[in-house]
Amino acid sequence: MEAYERIKKSIIEGAYAPGTRLTEENLAKELQISRTPIREAIKRLETERLISPLKRGVIVSEFNTEDIRQIYNLRALLEGYAAAEAAVNRSDEDIEAMERCNEQFKDLLENPTYERTERLNEIMELNNQFHSAVYNASHNEHLRFHISSVTVLPLVFRSFYWYNEYQLKKSLELHQTISVAIQANEPDRAKTAMQEHIYQGRDHVLKNIDHES
């Protein structure tokens, strides 16, 4: 897990940029660990499409606009279903976990005492925790496994770093709508709110990719 987390972190943070070639030997030297955990980490990162195999070594994956659109659309289907399942299967503890994330998110928005990058790091982590709480509330481990393969893309593009204050507030509002719908056992409403949340994220990434290209 340590090798996997460290390599993944380097990809997400841009230390290993898209198109960078990686080998077991070089990674083992850089991380100062044996090649066996490196090999296992590479297999897992390939399943998440963060890296792609070469004849020798692997390469950090590059995503075009169609990749982004397809992955976000699939994520909307999966996470929408997860939210609907959560509205049926959730426990009181699941609701508390979602509300706790939303309260902390709200506190960060209302009290911007952190430096911007540090604050956005906190918000991004709370966003991940909220979505994980929804997956947990679905009580469907098979669903969680498939969702994990399509949730790395927003991390790669660090999409929250393109959000202004209004967009951050809209993200929180949708989190709150999702949480209320799940608590009220309203699967259709929870599904619709989650899908709208994902589609807004998709459109936001595509807009900013176009501006940067």
Image (cartoon, rainbow, N blue to C red):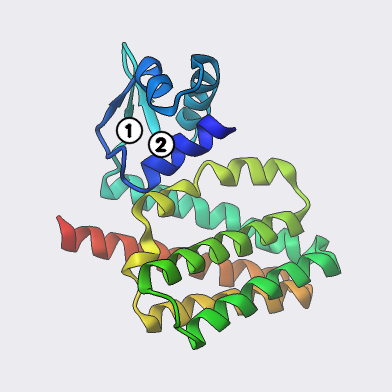
Res. 194 visible in picture: yes
Q: Residues within 10 Å of mark 1 (few under 14, many from 20)?
A: many
Q: Position of residue 136 (x, y in %)?
A: 73, 55
* Residue 91 lies in quadrant: bottom right
Question: What is the residue that sits farthest to the left in this orientation?
Answer: 213
| Element on which disc 1 rests | strand
Residue 136 or residue 82, whichever sits in front: 136
In the rendered image, the quadrant that contains the C terminus is: bottom left
Which residue is drawn at the image coordinates 57% and 44% (left, top)? Answer: 148
Residue nearer the viewer, 116 or 173: 116
Give the residue drawn at x 51%, y 17%. 34
The answer to whether marks 1 and 2 mark residues whose Cβ atoms lie closer than 8 Å is yes
For residue 50, which numbered disc appears in the image? 2
Residue at 54% across / 15% down in the picture? 36
Looking at the image, residue 66 sits to the left or right of residue 82; the answer is left
Looking at the picture, does residue 25 appear above or below residue 48? above
Residue at image point 39% right, 46% down: 12
Mark 1 → mark 2, Cα distance in angstroms: 6 Å
Q: Amino acid at mark 1?
A: Val
Which of the two labelled residues, at mark 1 and mark 2, occupies the earlier sequence position?
2
Q: Given the image, on which type of amino acid does mark 2 rest?
A: Leu
- Crowd band around label 2 with a 10 angstrom C-alpha radius: few (<14), some (14–19), many (20+): many
Question: Residue 132, how many percent across, how many down?
Answer: 64, 56
Q: Please say whether residue 173 is visible from this viewpoint.
A: no
